[in-house]
Image (cartoon, helix red, strand yellow):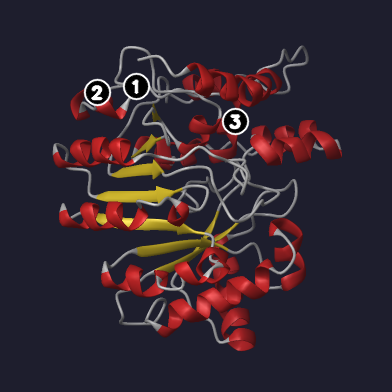
Amino acid sequence: MAKSLLAQQHALADTHHQRQILNRPDPEGAFPSFGERLAAVGHAPLRPARTEIFQVNLGKMCNQTCKHCHVDAGPDRKEIMTRETMQLCLDALAKSDLQTVDLTGGAPEMNPDFHWFVEEIRRLGRRVMVRCNLTIIVANPKYHDLPSFFREHGVEVVSSLPHFSARRTDAQRGEGVFERSIRALRMLNEVGYGKEGSGLRLNLVYNPSGAFLPGDQEELQQEFKQKLKQEWGVEFNQLYAITNMPISRFLEYLLRSGNYDAYMHKLVAAFNPAAVPGVMCRNTLSVGWDGFLYDCDFNQMLDLTTADGSPQHVRDFDAAALETRPIVVGQHCYGCTAGAGSSCGGTTT
């Protein structure tokens, strides 16, 4: 199935340029092909292990415009998943044994059919995770019910918080974001999220604020827990440390600041074969706002659909065929295999 002309034009305006930068000739051999690197350690072609997570992008509309956002989301984005495409996702779930649905965006809660979709997924008996940016909860009174809605449906909340200080958080995500995030975290805590024994999971996501790899996830978690509890009375379950991928706004930052080559050198030098088995493309299938299928959320942002010969739209979902597909890789994949590895669930080793 071919994408609409409008979707193609929008994608080409952004992703073609990014792919050119990431795949430009490297006469000095400083950035060897990621595919060749995989082959050298016995992991090519990379294939799924067991697909367990259905990650669905409900649209690129967001109430924030974060500097590191790999989705390039913001208030001006109009791409949004329709209820028709959501129903195709539900149909795919019904004929598969996928147990977890990971809802993302943009701000997925801004999709007008968000509540309905969550309710229908839960009706199928599947676990729901929501990538919530926190500030959406306090942005408008119509979203103030989100903590109670999440609790009612047993939704796991995963939220970005770059740092436990206002200065560093606001530098990455916008002025006043830290204060609004703390208010939202307290609202989630009030209904039981992050509290021991509640069964309501609240996990935070840490991304470095510059061109470097994240520190040790366990140490960061301990520090975040101590500081947030001590200074703000906030509690949460786990912290996920995720490497910034050299795509979209972060790629723009790297180029603008003159850090692109140094950052890529850092990722390539830190390539860790032990991180490969745990990369998210091996247990996750990503669905774009328009229903197209991708091996991961990052491939989605580069418009790299699943491999030729495998289903490429949720309308054609075939679990058996997708389980045997070769995973599409590129130079950006070094971000997921550097150091301790990186996935939507934090480090992989």
What residue is disc 3 on?
A: 332
Q: Can residue 337 be seen here?
A: no
Q: Position of residue 122 (x, y in %)?
A: 21, 57
N-term mark: 3 or 2: 2
Q: Is residue 230 above or below residue 21?
A: below
Label 3, label 2: how far apart the Cα atoms are: 27 Å
Residue 187: mark in rendering: none
What residue is disc 2 on?
A: 316
Kind of residue sitting beneath label 1? Gln
Task: State yes or no: discs 1 and 2 in contact (Cβ < 8 Å).
Answer: yes
> Dot 3: what SS?
helix
Q: Is residue 67 above or below residue 200?
A: above
- Of the residues tagged 3 and 2, which is closer to the observer? 2
Kind of residue sitting beneath label 2? Asp
Label 1, label 2: how far apart the Cα atoms are: 7 Å
Residue 312: mark in rendering: 1
> Dot 2: what SS?
helix
Q: Position of residue 342 (x, y in %)?
A: 52, 46
* CA neighbours of label 1 inside 10 A, class few (<14), some (14 to 19), many (20+): many
